Amino acid sequence: MCHCSVCRYTHGAPCSFHTPLPVGVEPEFIAPSRLDKLTCYGEPGSKSGLYFCSTCGCHIGGYYGQWTVSTAIFDANRDDNILLFNAHMLPDSSPDGGIAAIFSTVDGRQLQIDDLDGKALPSPVLPRELQSTNEQLRAQCHCGGVSFTIARPSAAFLASPESKGVVSGANVIAWMFVALDHISPAPSKDGFLIGTAKAYQSSDDVTRVFCGTCGATVFYHCKERPHIIDVAMGILRAPEGAMAENWSVWRAGRPAWPENGMRYHAGFSQALIEGMKQWGKERGHPQDFVIP
């Protein structure tokens, strides 16, 4: 699990979930899918970069001389032993530790802390005019193609983790529930688009939005909550860190759709659920709430 700012800002998730393939081994795509049907975010004309689905935005992995693949895209109902969660990479990239501060073991196995021997790229700093202020929270994907602000509400925004984000390519994604009229510039009415965003209709009543350039998950909107839009917390630029606690109240006791996560990797999902409960108690977040 990599918590660096590049992974958070390109995925829209609290961190990325990747497993390396042996050198020389490449993914075998199932027709009609092909490598050239994916969008590559990297150096123009180079094979190296992050790859995501051009239609729905799901990250499938990256290639930098060796393939890494996103663990969330594997089939459910398989043996948990196929994937071994072994490390939090670069948790200090976020001042608050992000979700690395939530759990430190999976299936009783202590997770390593990997800082890449200090060789990680520094987190990019936004120009002063784009930085968050006390009254405006900046949200921006890695490439900057999608960028907007969220006005501070009279009470903190509600936030919740969701286990198993298949469309994002991450095992967990976190959402902040924001009134549409608090977002500037306002998303378009025909797909909730801003800048380089693309929309994907995952069901009749659900629209998902991602950056068409870097693949970051941006929004989730459902018709039953027409005036609320879910903002992917991985693209928030809160100075206090990835959990954005100065802006949000977390539903710590119940992630959304926990049964989905349990189907894919029960050990990881249980670690997240139990860790969130304890973290919420320590930080003063409610165990549950109703989304308005």
Image (cartoon, grey):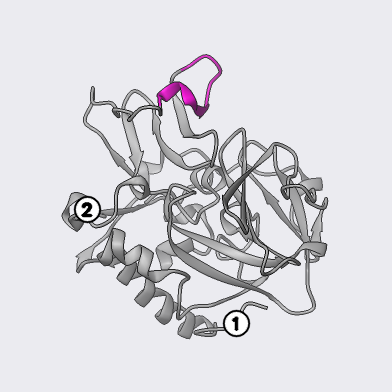
Identity of the residue drawn at 53% across and 41% down: 57
Residue with the most extreme top position: 45
Q: Amino acid at mark 2?
A: Leu
Q: Earlier in the sequence, mark 1 or mark 2?
A: 2
Measured as percent of width and height from the top left, residue 67 is found at: 32, 30
- Kind of residue at badge 1: Val
259 inside magenta stretch: no
- Is label 1 in contact with label 2 (beta carbons under 8 Å)? no
Q: Secondary structure at mark 2?
A: loop
33 w.r.t. 189: above or below: above
In the rendered image, the residue lying farthest to the front is: 204
Left or right side of 252 for 273: left
Tell me which residue sits at (40%, 25%) in the image: 34
Q: Is residue 131 above or below residue 44?
A: below
> Residue 274 at what x, y percent from top left?
35, 77
> Label 1, on which residue?
290
Residue 169 picture location, percent across and down: 44, 47
Count residues near mark 1 (Cα–Cα under 10 Å), then give few for <14, some for 14-19, many for 20+: few
Check disc 2 and report the residue beneath it: 84
Label 1 element class: loop
Which segment did they paint magenta? Answer: 34-46
Residue 21 or residue 108, whichever sits in front: 21
Magenta-span inclusion, residue 36: yes
Corner quadrant of residue 183: bottom right
